[in-house]
Amino acid sequence: MSDVEKKILKIYDGSRPVDEDLFDSSTVNHVTLSLAILLFGLVVWLCLALVNAENQRYALEARKCIDPAFPKEIDNACMQVVKSRASWWEHLWYGVTHLSPEKK
């Protein structure tokens, strides 16, 4: 190999990938992303639980699931399928904005 070839190889040596750095990976980003996904899932789950609870609470307040045979009792089958407001986001909005029960 001549001196000219050695100089050219030395010039382009920095453009070659370093074999030690090819498979380096950090787990910090994976932990952060996993934690963010877990927390997002928890928020979604809590929102669904709040919507369900507010739906049933408002159905009880509006007396939408009264048992026809026993007027002072609640129809549990109705409570499972009742839609007491037009949309789920109305339940979510009411549940988030009203943290304590209304006093009558």
Image: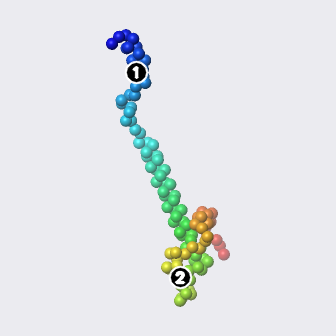
- For the residue pair 12 and 34, the one nearer the viewer reads as 12
Q: Which residue is mark 1?
A: 13
In the depicted view, which residue is nearer to us: 11 or 50?
Answer: 11
For disc 2, the neighbor class at 10 Å (few under 14, some 14 to 19, many from 20) is some
Q: Quadrant of the N terminus?
A: top left
| Direction from residue 104 to residue 56 in the image, left or right | left
Give, as a three-letter code, the residue at label 1.
Answer: Asp
Which numbered disc, 2 or 1, marks the residue closer to the eye?
1
Q: Residue at x 49, y 61 (%)?
A: 45
Q: Earlier in the sequence, mark 2 or mark 1?
A: 1
Which SS class for mark 1?
helix
Q: Quadrant of residue 21?
A: top left
Q: Considering only vertical position in the picture, is 72 above or below 101? A: below
Residue under circle 2?
74
Report the side of 95 relative to 11 (left or right).
Answer: right
- Is disc 2 placed on a helix, strand or loop? loop
**Coordinates of residue 39 in the picture (x, y in percent):** 49, 54
- Answer above or below: position of 71 versus 90: below
Question: Is residue 30 in sight in this rendering?
Answer: yes
Name the residue furthest right: 104
Which percent across, then down, holds residue 85? Answer: 61, 71
Q: Residue, x 57% and y 69% (percent of image)?
A: 54
Disc 1 crowd rating (10 Å Cα; few below 14, some 14-19, many 20+) is few
- The residue lying toward the viewer, choosing from 37 and 73, is 37
Which quadrant, please, contains the C terminus?
bottom right
Q: Amino acid at mark 2?
A: Ile
Vertical order, 19 against 94 (above or below): above
Residue lying at 54% horizontally and 66% vertically, measured from the top left: 50
Q: Position of residue 16 (x, y in %)?
A: 40, 25
How far apart marks 2 and 1 lie (CA) works out to 81 Å
Residues at marks 2 and 1 touching, judged by CB atoms closer than 8 Å:
no
Can you name the residue that lies furthest to the left here? Answer: 1
